[in-house]
């Protein structure tokens, strides 16, 4: 159920195009957890971040049905490319259909598999000079693993590059006096503490949707 604030934000932000509407509709029809999709407002923010940075090398951890990948791809300038990582191979057909509807299939490489392994592979390709570092990383996969992803990607982002981490306020569960014991909440809490005390970066958390960290590597 869309809140009055979310509705106002959506109605006063540039609407999503036909391809993103199609992906959103298909996600509602064909998946069990459509609420994982980032949606029109955050999608527009992602497009704009890509445009504002002129980002050409983008890494996404947690593709789901491809909504945020397509949103970022629509902000890419010529020569840009996105690597997107997804563990659930049952989503592959839907993801590829969406990329093709949006006409961005040549701009995005989908890596099916566990992100932790894929990150190790991509990191080793960067270290050996086979691929350049990333300008922008969008982290939106398993909240228990955010610290693992971060430890790997911080070395894969160029100085001045940005890591966006989604859902870092985790439904307000971090705000009480005692922290819930579930591993996802603990994972996010640990991640926020880790980033806030990391001298290699500057960070700000925006309360958009469920919290978005903007982390800039110095
Ligand atoms: C919140 S959804 C991503 C939503 C998407 N970024 C969007 O904005 O529409 C998280 C996704 O991460 C995937 N995921 C979870 N753990 C993963 C892992 N270890 N490796 C790769 N993908 C993972 C899930 O299968 C799920 O599709």
Image (cartoon, rainbow, N blue to C red):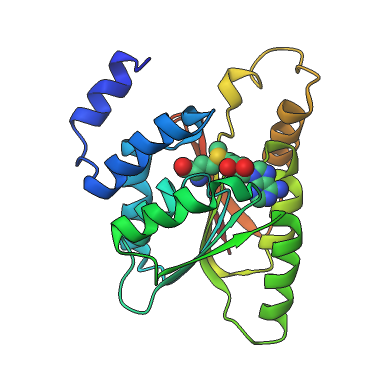
Quadrant of the image occupied by residue 141? top right
Asked if residue 115 can be seen in this view, the reply is yes
* Residue 69 placement (x, y as % from top left): 43, 54
Which residue of the protein is positioned furthest toward the bottom in this rendering? 129
Q: How many labels does the image show?
A: 0
Give residue 38's position: percent from left, percent from top. Answer: 43, 37
Any part of residue 208 in sight: no
* Rendered image quadrant of residue 101: bottom left
Pinpoint residue 63: horizontal percent, then vertical percent. 53, 50
- Residue positioned 62% across, 56% down in the render: 201
Where does residue 146 sit, x and y in percent of width and height? 70, 44
- Quadrant of the snapshot with the N terminus: top left
Against 48, residue 187 (above or below) is above
Q: Nearer the viewer, residue 202 or 165?
A: 165
Q: Residue at point 42% right, 36% down?
A: 27
Above or below, comparing residue 19 to residue 128 in the picture:
above
Task: Determine the residue positioned at 57% across, 21% down.
Answer: 171
**Is 208 placed left or right of 74 in the picture?**
right
- Looking at the image, in which quadrant does ligand 1 appear? top right
Q: In this view, does 169 lie to the left or right of 150?
A: left
Tell which of 150 and 119 is nearer to you: 119
Residue at position x 73%, y 71% in the image: 121
Q: In terms of depth relative to the viewer, which is nearer, 171 or 27? A: 27
- 30, 118: nearer the viewer: 30
Is residue 193 found left or right of 166 in the rendered image?
Answer: right
Which quadrant would the C terminus be assigned to in this image? bottom right
Quarter of the rendering containing residue 116: bottom right
């Amino acid at each position: 159920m869309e809140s009055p604030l979310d509705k106002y934000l959506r109605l006063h932000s540039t609407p999503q195009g036909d391809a993103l509407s199609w992906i959103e509709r298909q996600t509602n029809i064909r998946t069990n957890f459509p609420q994982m999709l980032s949606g029109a407002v955050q999608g527009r923010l992602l497009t704009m971040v890509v445009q504002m940075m002129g980002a050409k090398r983008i890494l996404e951890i947690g593709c789901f049905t491809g909504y945020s990948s397509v949103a970022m791809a629509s902000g890419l300038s010529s020569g840009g490319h996105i690597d997107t990582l997804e563990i659930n191979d049952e989503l592959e057909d839907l993801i590829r259909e969406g990329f093709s509807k949006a006409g961005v299939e040549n701009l995005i490489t989908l890596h099916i598999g566990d992100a932790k392994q894929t990150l190790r592979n991509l990191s080793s390709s960067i270290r050996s000079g086979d691929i350049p570092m990333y300008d922008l990383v969008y982290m939106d996969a398993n909240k228990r693993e955010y610290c693992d992803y971060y430890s790997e990607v911080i070395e894969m982002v160029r100085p001045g590059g940005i890591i966006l981490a989604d859902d870092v306020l985790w439904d307000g569960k971090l705000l009480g006096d005692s922290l819930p014991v579930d591993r996802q909440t603990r994972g996010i809490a640990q991640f926020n503490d880790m980033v806030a005390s990391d001298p290699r970066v500057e960070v700000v958390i925006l309360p958009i949707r469920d919290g978005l960290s903007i982390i800039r590597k110095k």
